[in-house]
Amino acid sequence: MTAALVLNGPNLNLLGSREPGVYGAATLADVERLCVTTGAELGIDVECRQSNLEGELVGWLQEAGARQAAGELLGVVLNAGAYTHTSIALRDAVVGAGVRVIELHISNVHAREEFRQHSYLSAVAAGVIVGLGVNGYPLALRALTLS
């Protein structure tokens, strides 16, 4: 069975309590259950990880690139949180590792503050899902199964 990796960045561990008017009531545990259930429907294993640390996310992207090259991984669903708008290191990890990434945002970043409207990741992502709430995660996983 092939796998997919779901990576969530800083502050996503606070889902459900952090700005529910923006991010909704679902918790990170709810998101992870949704992803695993979707993976089972698609016939893939789904691994979910969250970190508030940029370097840890970089390491996981590099690991994912190696696993993808070995035929073990379809790619990564990446909700990099605020690092989307600040991290050249994450962008370089995606490119350097050669990993297929679907960039994901729970909120519609284009309808929010100006600084959230720029992404260092979009140009190197296979696709971008924005503003569909946590329902974007199953869509991103489905996108990874497309060749």
Image (cartoon, rainbow, N blue to C red):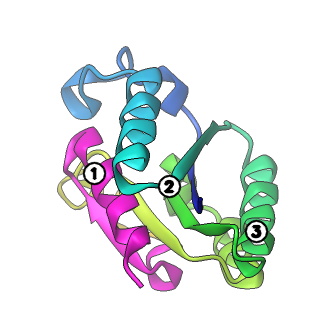
Q: Position of residue 5 (x, y in %)?
A: 59, 54
Q: Which mark is residue 67?
A: 3
- Which of 64 and 91 lies nearest the eye of the viewer? 64
100 in relation to 108, above or below: below
- Which of 68 and 94 lies nearest the eye of the viewer? 68
136 in relation to 63, above or below: above
Quadrant of image for the C terminus: bottom left
Query: Which dot, 1 or 2, sits closer to the camera?
Result: 2
Query: Which dot, 3 or 2, sits closer to the camera?
Result: 2
Q: Quarter of the image holding residue 63?
A: bottom right
Q: Position of residue 14 (x, y in %)?
A: 48, 21
Which callout, 1 or 3, points at the residue further toward the start of the chain? 3
Which callout, 1 or 2, points at the residue further toward the start of the chain? 2
- Which of 34 and 88 lies nearest the eye of the viewer? 34
63 in relation to 9, above or below: below
Residue at (49% x, 58% y) in the render: 77
Residue at the extreme top of the image, as rendered: 17
Where are the magenta residues, as a range? 120-147
Q: Is residue 131 magenta?
A: yes
Give the residue type at disc 3.
Answer: Arg
Identify residue for label 2.
44
Q: Position of residue 39 (x, y in %)?
A: 43, 48
Q: Quarter of the image holding residue 9?
A: top right
Give the residue type at disc 2.
Answer: Ile
Spatial separation of the CA atoms under disc 3 and disc 2:
14 Å
Please tell me how crowded label 3 is: few (under 14), some (14-19), or many (20+) other residues with Cα within 10 Å: some
Identify residue for label 1.
136
144 in relation to 141, above or below: below
Give the residue type at disc 1.
Answer: Gly
Residue at (80% x, 73% y) in the render: 66
Query: Which dot, 1 or 3, sits closer to the camera?
Result: 3
Q: Is residue 142 magenta?
A: yes
